[in-house]
Amino acid sequence: MSTSYQIRHVSFDAKKGLLTDSCQQHHLSYTESRLLTLLLERQNKIVSKEELKNFAWEHTVVTDSSLTKSIAKIRQSLSTYFPNDEIIATVPRVGYRLDLEDTSISENKLEHEDETSIVLPNENNVGYQAQILSLKKLIFIIKQGLLVLSIALLAYSGFNLFRKLPNDYRNYLNNDYSATDITENAFTHKIIKPKNITIPENIKEILAEKKCNCIFMIDKRDRHYSISYFNEDTKLGESYILD
């Protein structure tokens, strides 16, 4: 895919996640930049929700709610440049489409350009600033990788715990955790979570979809929720990481 796009009078650098014109600039997050890139590559065509989620979050399982929030943030950034245009159209129950006829795409890559450097214009000591920003970005990527790994290990440990969890499991919980039994549609869910977190509505909807007598373990690290569940009837389960 290309690295630079021209949306009318606005330049979009997909590698840096930067929208700019002659007056202002907006930074997009990594996932927002990936979403906008795919929509630009498929401009005037419908891109399904699954395609967008797989492209932006890659190997992470996310809900439609996370996609909706990211699209809303992209629209908000674009609205500062195009206040009278709805550039990203919603196709109900299918996906999204970027409606723009005069978008140009260019390979704007320097021969010796550092893939992880972010160079800010009109700054003194530009080379030094680029090295510092490149190092910060590398550290951020490493931290994010370690965070996802730790959540995955936590979810896997919780899943294995379910296999040997006794019926009186409440007696074995740390004081920082709580356990709740919820009966819905003739099924009983045992939910274990830290006392200091509140389960968002979108995660409650996911739990309600599970038609089983299940044990759920929910934890949170930064913006990420790790969810492991174990079906007591089938002795099977899964683990998820959600934004």
Image (tube, rainbow, N blue to C red):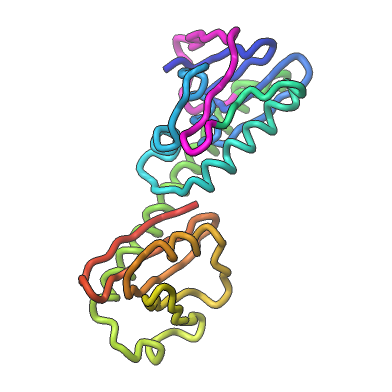
Question: Residue 102 magenta-drawn?
Answer: yes
Q: Residue at x 55, y 28 (%)?
A: 131
Residue 233 picture quarter: bottom left
Residue 59, percent across and down? 35, 43
Q: Residue at x 44, y 60 (%)?
A: 206
The region drawn magenta spans 91-118
Q: Is residue 5 left or right of residue 155?
A: right
Residue 127 picture quarter: top right
Q: Residue at x 78, y 18 (%)?
A: 23
Instruction: Name the residue at the left extreme.
Output: 234
Residue 82, percent across and down? 73, 21
Q: Main secondary structure of the magenta part?
A: loop
Residue 239, percent across and down? 33, 60
Residue 164 picture quarter: bottom left
Quadrant for the N terminus, please: top left
Question: Residue 238 magenta-drawn?
Answer: no
Instruction: Name the residue at the right extreme.
Output: 23
Q: How many marks?
A: 0
Pick whichever, 238 or 194, lies toward us: 238
Q: Is residue 163 above or below residue 153?
A: below
Q: Residue at x 44, y 45 (%)?
A: 142
Residue 112, percent across and down? 45, 13
Q: Is residue 98 left or right of residue 148?
A: right
Q: Is residue 225 above or below residue 7?
A: below
Q: Is residue 204 above or below residue 88?
A: below
